[in-house]
Amino acid sequence: MPTTQPTLGARSSRILTVDGLEFKDLNGNGVLDPYEDWRLPVAERVADLVGRMTTAEKAGLMLITSHYMGASAIIEDPDQGLLNTHEKWSDTNFWAAETSSTYRFDPPVLDYTGSEKAINDLGLRYLIIRDNPTSHDLAVWTNALQELAESSTHGIPVVMVSNPRNHVSDSAIFGVAEAADQMSQWPGELGLAATGDADLVEEFGRLAARQWRAAGITKGYMYMADIVTEPRWSRASGTFGENPERAAAMIGAVTRGFQGRTLGAHSVSLTTKHFPGGGPRDKGHDPHFEHGRYQPYPTAGSLYRYHLPVFQAAIEAGTTSIMPYYATTINAMSAAQLKNGRPFDEVGFAYDKYLLTEVLRNELGFTGYINSDTGISTGMPWGMESATRSERFARAIDAGVNAFAGDGNPQPLIDAVEQGLVSAAQLDRSVTYLLTEMMELGLFENPYVDPDAAQAIAEDSGIQALADEAHRKSLVLLRNDAGVLPLAREDDVVRLYVEVFTGNDAAGETATIAGEVSDALAGTDGITVVDVLEDATHALLWVRPGMSLLNDKPDTDLSIALDAETGIDADRIVEIEERVPTVLAVNFTNPWLLDRVAPGASAVVGTFGVLTDALVDLIRGAITPSGTLPYTIPADDAAVRGNASDVPGADEPTGYAYIDATGAEYVFGYGRDRF
């Protein structure tokens, strides 16, 4: 029995002194109850609290919903329950967010009317953060929510949940931080994979977890264990690439980094997603949409060979929870995958009892809890469309789901219990998982944080210095004709023209990035940035295509062209390449096709969510290239359309990968380690 007095954070509850030690009187009854006694084993504390909770309280605890700093904007919908006006359900049942500017509150709006309803009336405790404030303002807000929770019947704390916040991205959707002074900014997940350095990734997780906990965030909906086997999938940029071995090393490292070897007050608890792997998308479409609901496995044995090993690595690293995807398999589109020739159940993965119980728990040995993706009870219930919301809850719980994201209305779950569709024992099992997580994270003793300390840790220059090193290591030099790189030479004067291609310049992004390049090159001997191409001896073109999940199209095109997904002027790129020696940098959020824009370049560099300074350091020779491709670049559009959606590019037949004029094949693991 531990006897070391922990630091207690109490704002709405009083402190009890027993045996010379202090405890929080969370339910205000003046007695030290077992769940309040930090000396007892967590299992004993949890069992006591579960026995005190009503069915309604348990149902509320099992729901996870988005919550915004502008809480006064909360509204009620008779079908959806508690929502925020920044969320909406379209006619196609897809959760959509408005523009990223919606997420900015400066100063933050701290009206807790909606928060009081969510926490005290509905019993919600898992709240997803969609805002991007400073760490100071985030800490102020999370403290206020914890104070509301502490004043409730049992004083159960809030678990603040977020998607990744520490990666450079051209998109701010799904909780990606927009400014480097909010938290340290690291390469994108693909960039971390490109470093090939699992130790660096584990250290990233440890340092980022410090920043999260300082701001009051204790749970992450991350990281993606999905393997990129269909290059047109809009969520490829959130993965660790196509290779199961490298992705497994990265997912294990980042999980150990964020959580530690065991959960504690230092940890951010992770939810690994999207089981059993979201990579095999039908023509690249995402199952947020009905037209993307199917997940085919055309290659026999691909599920176990390519997609499950990364989840196995996350489990071995101790991931707290695992999230199944919306998708449903379809036997008519799939070769044999499951043991004993068993067919798929053809329902969404969160409803598939065989996959969640037999495969995930019994075969892979997962002992944590299962957290559904957002909206399986309301918006994307593939295979259960005709069922009531109560029936959907019941089917998912029977399959093994313990927590439901994207639903703020506990009543249908309560109804399921009253109708006999869900047993009290099933509720208790799920609530036990969740309360155990909260107690192991130390939230019952002290959920509060120091806003000033949060901002100081967010701005820690030492953490960013290591992140900067990761950026440099993530760059992949793909080609360097006639030694054009590095550009800085003692006997040459380089007049460099810079142009950035984004396909969408509504916010002046092109000029901003070009200005960053110019600033980073200032003072570099031998290089002068010029404003017009006619004055240039060389050019740097940074092509930054993007693919939005919200714009999933019937016919996705990875070509870099105005009439393709990218909306980028390939003719302009080719024109510049024909006039001066050109360094072509491409930000590979997806495996964009190079067949049109790369042949005329003198050098080609792959970036994967990188700070401008790092790219400049490479082209001027301040660093030596070391990154390697995290996935294969297809040869052309025919290769993309002919690919097997469940197989990594490196294992596709000969002819799939792009081959440049030097004969180099751009497969997983390729990258020049010298100029």
Image (cartoon, rainbow, N blue to C red):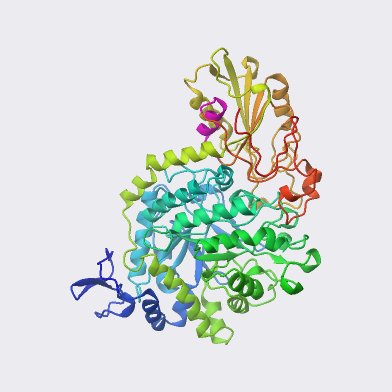
Horizontally, is 525 left or right of 654 in the view? left
Q: Position of residue 254 (x, y in %)?
A: 50, 53
> Residue at (49%, 79%) from the top-left corner?
429
Examine the rendering and report whether any part of residue 177 can be seen.
no
Q: Nearer the viewer, residue 68 or 524?
A: 524
- State the image quarter where residue 441 is shown: bottom left
**Magenta span has 86?**
no
Examine the rendering and report whether any part of residue 663 can be seen.
yes
Q: Position of residue 522 (x, y in %)?
A: 48, 22
Q: Main secondary structure of the magenta part?
A: helix
- Extent of the magenta region: 610-622
Task: Check the picture and name the quadrant holding the N terminus.
Answer: bottom left
> Residue at (54%, 18%) from the top-left corner?
527
Horizontally, is 298 left or right of 500 in the view? right
> Residue at (54%, 64%) from the top-left corner?
315
Task: Check the picture and name the quadrant holding the C terminus.
Answer: top right
> Residue at (27%, 63%) from the top-left corner?
7
Horizontally, is 617 left or right of 381 in the view? left
**Magenta span has 611?**
yes
Q: Nearer the viewer, residue 95 or 158?
A: 158
Q: Position of residue 139 (x, y in %)?
A: 36, 54
Q: Is residue 50 above or below residue 265?
A: below
Most distant residue in the left direction = 20
Q: Position of residue 269 (x, y in %)?
A: 46, 61
